[in-house]
């Protein structure tokens, strides 16, 4: 039923795209698919899978290129300054809002044109399975009794994982030490005991949870995820904290509408491919394409959330 619903939504999305004769000339050369984070992480694996499927649809190589640094600022700056010809796209996420709100780049999130959203996934709060915390309430109880003692790892200061952790901790009145440890070391710090917990996208924690190394105590999503049906979401625990991670595509401002339409069509068709759907079921993200108007509305709403967290945290 889920797959049928996704296919119907994507079919409507593709049908809404108005094509023009100018598309006969696009694309004529490889397309650079910029990934704002290092190889091997969830963003990289998901992006590479989508890029491979888009290559088959567009008939030219869609080449993943990792441009990590400054929480995504390096990649977004690169694409923001690229030629608006459709041959440079960026695999965006909430990071496009965090880096702009933090002032890590001299432009706003809407300085680029947006193609659409591909998927979203929950953020999860994970602890070492050897810890004494069987559920999130027990962590909160200990945290309130021991302010500024427990350490929560994140991907970097101002990252989506950092802001999500701030939102979750503030919602329950917990004072913790936030460790901006980076994506590559985030998991290992929890395994080694350097950090007591971490906040991460589900795709960044699911494998170690399945291996019995992590315990997932709560998610920041709006409901339970079918990949982790036993993990409660914050709302059902009476906690006002919701912060999903989304991923989609953006291009330089001024890219011709016909080219953006062609990319949007390819993006949506790639998202419904068997390979991408299989990855989604395996690691827990939800394939839910949004066309540009809906995606821009989502970006505007999430930008307000991010700006509020940044402001309240004094970042």
Image (tube, rainbow, N blue to C red):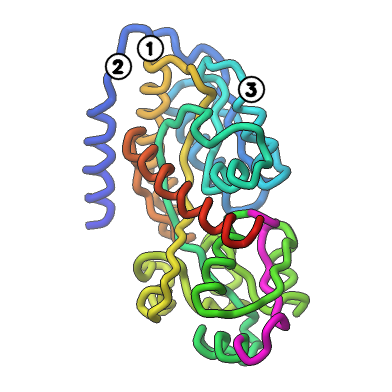
Q: CA distance from mark 3 to mark 1?
A: 23 Å
**Is tag 2's residue or tag 3's residue first in the polypeptide sequence?**
2
Rendered-image quadrant of the C terminus: bottom right
Give the quadrant of residue 231. Answer: bottom left
Instruction: State the image coordinates of residue 120 (x, y, percent, origin top left).
Output: 43, 52
Instruction: State the image coordinates of residue 252 (x, y, percent, origin top left).
Output: 54, 23
Q: Which mark is residue 81?
A: 3
Rendered-image quadrant of the N terminus: bottom left
Q: Which mark is residue 23?
A: 1
Instruction: Tell me the crowding category of disc 1: few under 14, some 14 to 19, or many 20 or more residues within 10 angstroms, Cα based.
Output: some
Taking 89 as reference, is 191 left or right?
Answer: right
- Give the residue number, with chain letter if any, for mark 2: 19
Q: Residue at x 42, y 76 (%)?
A: 239
Taking 98 as reference, is 148 left or right?
Answer: right
Which of pointers 2 and 3 indicates the residue nearer the eye?
3
287 to 248, vertically: above or below: below
Instruction: Give the magenta range.
Output: 144-158
Residue 157 lies in magenta, yes or no?
A: yes
Instruction: State the image coordinates of residue 290 (x, y, percent, origin top left).
Output: 34, 40
């Amino acid at each position: 039923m889920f797959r049928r619903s996704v296919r119907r939504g994507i079919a409507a999305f593709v049908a809404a795209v108005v094509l023009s004769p100018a598309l006969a000339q696009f694309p004529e050369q490889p397309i650079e698919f910029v990934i704002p984070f290092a190889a091997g992480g969830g963003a990289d694996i998901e992006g590479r899978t989508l890029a491979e499927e888009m290559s088959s649809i567009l008939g030219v190589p869609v080449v993943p290129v990792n441009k990590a640094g400054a929480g995504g600022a390096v990649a977004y700056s690169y694409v923001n300054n690229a030629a608006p010809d459709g041959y440079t796209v960026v695999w965006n996420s909430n990071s496009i809002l965090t880096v702009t709100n933090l002032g890590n780049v001299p432009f706003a999130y809407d300085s680029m044109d947006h193609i659409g959203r591909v998927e979203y996934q929950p953020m999860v709060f994970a602890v070492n399975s050897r810890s004494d915390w069987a559920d999130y309430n027990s962590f909160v109880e200990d945290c309130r009794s021991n302010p500024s003692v427990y350490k929560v790892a994140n991907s970097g200061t101002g990252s989506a994982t950092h802001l999500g952790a701030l939102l979750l901790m503030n919602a329950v009145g917990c004072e913790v030490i936030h460790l901006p440890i980076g994506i590559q070391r985030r998991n290992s710090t929890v395994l080694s005991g350097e950090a007591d917990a971490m906040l991460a996208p589900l795709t960044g924690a699911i494998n170690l949870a399945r291996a019995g190394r992590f315990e997932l105590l709560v998610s920041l999503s709006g409901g339970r995820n079918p990949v982790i049906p036993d993990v409660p979401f914050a709302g059902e625990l009476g906690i006002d904290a919701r912060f999903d991670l989304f991923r989609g595509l953006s291009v330089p401002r001024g890219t011709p509408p016909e080219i953006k339409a062609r990319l949007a069509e390819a993006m949506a068709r790639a998202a419904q491919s068997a390979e991408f759907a299989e990855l989604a079921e395996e690691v827990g993200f939800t394939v839910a394409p949004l066309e540009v108007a809906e995606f821009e509305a989502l970006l505007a709403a999430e930008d307000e959330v991010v700006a509020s967290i940044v402001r309240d945290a004094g970042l």
